[in-house]
Structure formats: C-alpha cells, structure tokens
C-alpha cells in the first residue's frame, strides 16, 4: 500500500478502536519501508486526535476512548522497536511520571490518562496508586522526566497534591518539572492555588496540556 | 409492622440522608482509611452520624458500606472482613433508627472495570454484590441501594447479585454527567436505556446520585421520570469541591442554593430525595423543611 492508501486506514483503525487492524497496518508499514516517523505523525496521531474531538463532543465515551488508546498502543508496540533500530525515537513528547497520590487507591482515571499520554507519543512511567510523594520525584530524577502527573479522587488526598509541590520546592527542584494535577475534586482554580503548572479535566485534555508543555501541536 | 418504603413513597416524598465519609472525617477518620473499617473500630462515631441524619428528619439512612463489596475491600486488604464490616454497618444503623424509619444497605462500585475495558467478569461482580447483599441483609437492612454506578453493566450485575440472595427491594442510582446531548454515564449509557434495563432487571426504584448539582438534577429527574413508572430517587451533589482559604475543602453550592432546587426536583418526579457529596445533616434538615412546606400547599 502507498502511504496515501495506508494513512487513512491507520486513522480509521484508531477511531474504530480496532487493535488488530492498527497492529497489522503498522507491520505493513515496517515491511514496506515507509518513513515510520511520518507513519506515526500522519497515519496514527490524527486518529487519536479525532477520538479526542469525538470525546469532547460527547459522541465517544470511556469504552471508545479505552479501545482507541489500546489500538494506538498496539500500533506503537510494532513501530517503537523499529524506530529504535533506526535510532529514531517516536516518543517525541518526552517522559512523564504519573501516579495516584499517597493515601488514594483510585486508579481508573489515572490509568486512562496514562494510556492516552502513551497513545499521544509520551514515554509514560506509571507508578500505580497510593504513591509516596518522594517516589514521584525519585522516579522523575531517575528517568529524566519533564512532567509529573498527580491524580487524586478524594477531597482529602488532593491535599497531597499541594504537599507535593511544597516538597518539590524544598528539594530545590520546582522549576525542573511541569506538574499537572487531575482527579474528580481538582479544578483549574485548585491547580493555580497550589502552584501546579496545569490542570486537566479528563484524559483528552491531559494530552493536550502535556503536548502544549512539550511544545508540540 | 412499618409500611414498606415503596408504600410510603406513594403517600409523600421520602427523605434519604446526605454524605457519610465527610461526616466520619469530621469525627477523625484519617485520609486513606476505608470508612467501613470504622463500623467495628469506631462504632460510636458511625452510630452518631446515622443518628444525626435521623434526627435531621431523614426517613432512610444508608449504611456505611459504600466501599464494602469484597472486591473494593480487597484494595485495602480487607476482603476477608466483608461479612463483619457490612453486617456491623447495618446493625449500627438498625440500632440508631427510631421506630418507623428505614435502613438502606449501601453498595457502591467495585472500582473494577468489566472486560474488555478492565479485568472483571460479570460473574465476578455478581458474586461480589451477592456477598455484600447477604451480609447487609444479615445485619437487618430494609432495602438495598446500589449507588454511584457509572457503568450500567455493573449496576445490572449488582442487581442480579442482590436478588440472588435476598427478596429485599433493590434501589439503584447511576451517576450521570450532563452533556449537550443529554445525561449519560461516563460509559455512555443514556438515561432512557439505563432506566429501562434497570427496571427489566428488577429494580424497585431507580434514579441518579453524585456529580450533578441540585440544579442539574432537576433536568436529570425529568429525563428519568419520562422513561419509567418506577419511583425515582435523586441525591445530588452540593456542586463541585472547592479549596477554601483555610486549606479545607468546601462545595460550590451553598446550603441555600442547594435547597432552592429541591422543590423542583420533587415536582419533576423524584419520590425519594437525599444528598450526596457536600451535604450533611443540616442540608437534610433544610430539605425536610422545604419539602414539608410544599406538601402543605
């Protein structure tokens, strides 16, 4: 297939959440020797962007979002190793450390944000739920992340988002990382008040925000 | 013998209670501690909250067992204590309930997505809710309330679980979000489809709780009412959480603003009304007052 034929199919596979097709098309692209960075940016990324638009319009809900993110992951699982062999990283978004904050075991929203960030081209280090504040920093330092995303579902545990910023400041690392906060009780005003760099209401918004921090369209 | 709740709601508006977790926090429940644990560790505090809601005028109090399915308790390593914690939640409420008042056994989401989005099977969920329902019934609840359900499929599994172990009436409230095209769960279940399926599965009353403000709840109740002949339950949030200047968390709707929309919720068709996040015994007291005023007219 030429790229004019294959790109729309890749786009469709993501919008339809078709994991099998997304993977098969990626394998096809590798075999045909296509420019794989272009495949990612012009074949797959427009698909996930379209999914984001459908979500924002209330046409797509969580099941569709999850299926599409899974399809994107399936394609990237084929493309990433091939790109690495060519010494080209598709993870141009940079590295993100994410987790549900200390004291909070809720991870559905966080998992979704992690999937969508990964689908959006970020290298994601997911620390799980009930993550100690220090661990976010230690992991970010270890992998050289640029962003730290903190989720909290409870009004009590969202206080730890504030404590995290203070801890980052105490360790003299506040300006080194962009800190994004999310979760049911959080909102833009809260993010501003605690001195976070940004707030996202949902997974689609989180990807947009992360991309804006990474200087990507 | 007290008339059943389903008979009572034919004669007047029936009041549920408000939030539980925040009331326990006000009594010292720490962050990260599952509230259900207090049913055995701090029974006096739990009983006090129940009593405060009855005293405020609630006809029905929901048990402190929202996170009490064995699947949810497992997240805290407490799944082995489901029977003890749920039974205690119900017994304490029974003890606190004055004559002629009711106890609803609260069952919240397991926190696990069903396949293909998550690891859980329908059978897992049916079994988890069956166990919790059996334990709550053992503790003496009058009805079950399966609440804050964001996935219709989980709510249906919960009904099946409860009905497999007990003849008690099953009330179900889903959490709907307001979208330009109407009210949907985050999984995309519409009000019309949800209500029809819940009714078919044997729910005795259906409705909505959490997320929506009391103002938004009016429209949601209207949509639910047009889709079912079952009694409708509405338990709105007092708006959204906001950080207050003193470092604590409040809710965006004031008590006055919240209660202002209660008559409209009732006239839209809700027979059972109560509160969700951000509400407390004062909210219920004010709701009782405004509802009884309306009933006189």
Image: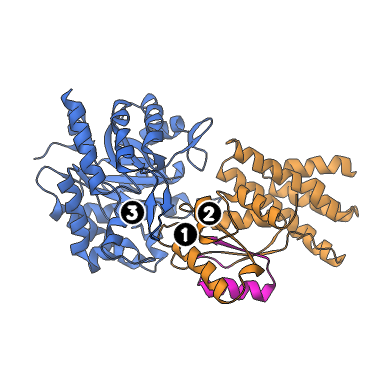
Chain colours: A orange, B blue
Q: Which residue is the extreme one toward the front? A: B245
Residue B194 is left or right of residue A96, and the answer is left
Residue B260 image offset from top left, x and y in percent: 31, 34
* Camera-side residue of B203 and A49: A49
Residues beneath discs 1 and 3 located on the same chain: no
Residue A145 in magenta stretch: yes
Reply above or below: B215 against B89.
above
Q: Circle 2 is placed at which residue position?
A: A109
Task: Judge whether residue B107 can be spotted in this image.
Answer: yes
Q: Circle 1 is placed at which residue position?
A: A106
Q: How many C-alpha atoms fall within 10 Å of the one at disc 3: few (<14), some, or many (≥20)? A: many
Q: CA distance from mark 3 to mark 2?
A: 19 Å
Residue appearing at x 61%, y 46% in the figure: A65
Residue A194 image offset from top left, x and y in percent: 51, 61
Q: Which residues are magenta?
A: A127-150
Q: Are the residues at dot 3 and dot 2 in contact (C-beta closer than 8 Å)?
A: no
Q: Circle 3 is placed at which residue position?
A: B66
Badge count: 3
* Element under disc 1: loop
Residue appearing at x 78%, y 50% in the figure: A24
Query: Based on the displayed image, in which of its 4 quarters is residue B229 positioned?
Result: top left
Q: CA distance from mark 1 to mark 2?
A: 8 Å
Residue B162 image offset from top left, x and y in percent: 31, 47
* Camera-side residue of A22 and B275: B275
Residue A211 image offset from top left, x and y in percent: 70, 54
Using the image, name the chain to which the residue with label 1 belongs: A
Using the image, name the chain to which the residue with label 2 belongs: A
Q: Are the residues at dot 1 and dot 2 in contact (C-beta closer than 8 Å)?
A: yes
Using the image, name the chain to which the residue with label 3 belongs: B
Q: How many C-alpha atoms fall within 10 Å of the one at disc 1: few (<14), some, or many (≥20)? A: many
Reply above or below: B88 against A205.
below
Q: Which residue is the extreme one toward the top? A: B297
């Amino acid at each position: 297939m030429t790229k004019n034929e294959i790109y729309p199919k890749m786009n469709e596979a993501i919008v339809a959440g078709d994991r099998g097709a997304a993977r098969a098309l990626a394998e096809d692209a590798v075999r045909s020797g296509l420019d794989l960075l272009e495949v990612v940016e012009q074949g797959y990324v427009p698909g996930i962007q379209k999914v984001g638009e459908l979500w924002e319009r209330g046409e797509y809900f969580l099941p569709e979002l999850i299926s599409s993110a899974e399809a994107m992951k399936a394609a990237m699982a084929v493309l990433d190793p091939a790109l690495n062999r060519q010494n080209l990283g598709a993870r141009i978004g940079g590295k993100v450390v994410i987790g549900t904050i200390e004291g909070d075991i809720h991870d559905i929203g966080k998992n979704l944000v992690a999937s969508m960030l990964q689908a959006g081209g970020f290298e994601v280090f997911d620390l799980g739920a009930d993550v100690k504040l220090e661990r976010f920093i230690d992991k970010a330092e270890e992998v050289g992340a640029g962003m730290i995303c903190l989720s909290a579902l409870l009004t009590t545990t969202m206080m730890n988002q504030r404590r995290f910023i203070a801890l980052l400041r105490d360790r003299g690392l506040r300006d080194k990382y962009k800190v994004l906060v999310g979760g049911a009780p959080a909102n833009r005003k809260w993010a501003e008040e605690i001195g976070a760099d940004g707030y996202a209401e949902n997974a689609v918004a989180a990807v947009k925000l992360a991309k804006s921090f990474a200087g990507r369209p | 013998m007290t008339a059943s709740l389903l008979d009572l709601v034919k004669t007047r508006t029936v009041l549920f209670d408000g939030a539980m977790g925040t009331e326990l926090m006000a009594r010292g429940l720490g962050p990260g501690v599952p509230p259900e644990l207090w049913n055995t560790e701090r029974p006096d505090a739990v009983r006090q909250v129940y009593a405060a809601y009855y005293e405020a005028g609630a006809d029905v109090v929901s048990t402190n067992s929202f996170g009490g399915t064995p699947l949810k308790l497992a997240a805290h390593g407490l799944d082995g204590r489901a029977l003890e914690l749920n039974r205690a939640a119900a017994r304490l409420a029974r003890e606190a309930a004055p004559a002629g008042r009711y106890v609803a056994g609260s069952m919240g989401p397991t926190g696990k997505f069903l396949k293909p989005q998550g690891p859980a099977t329908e059978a897992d969920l049916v079994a988890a809710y069956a166990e919790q329902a059996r334990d709550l019934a053992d503790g003496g609840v009058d009805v079950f309330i399966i609440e804050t359900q964001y996935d219709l499929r989980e709510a249906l599994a919960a009904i099946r679980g409860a009905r497999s172990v007990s003849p008690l009436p099953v009330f179900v409230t889903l959490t709907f979000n307001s979208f330009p095209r109407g009210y949907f769960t985050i999984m995309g279940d519409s009000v019309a489809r949800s209500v029809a399926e819940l009714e078919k599965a044997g729910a005795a009353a259906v409705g909505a709780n959490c997320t929506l403000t009391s103002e938004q709840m009016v429209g949601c109740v209207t949509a639910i009412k047009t889709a079912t002949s079952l009694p409708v339950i509405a338990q709105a949030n007092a708006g959204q959480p906001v950080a207050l200047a003193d470092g604590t968390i409040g809710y965006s709707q004031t008590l006055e603003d919240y209660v202002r929309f209660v008559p409209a919720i009732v006239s839209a068709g809700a027979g059972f009304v109560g509160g969700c996040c951000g509400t407390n015994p004062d909210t219920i007291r004010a709701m009782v007052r405004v509802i009884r005023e309306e009933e006189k007219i």
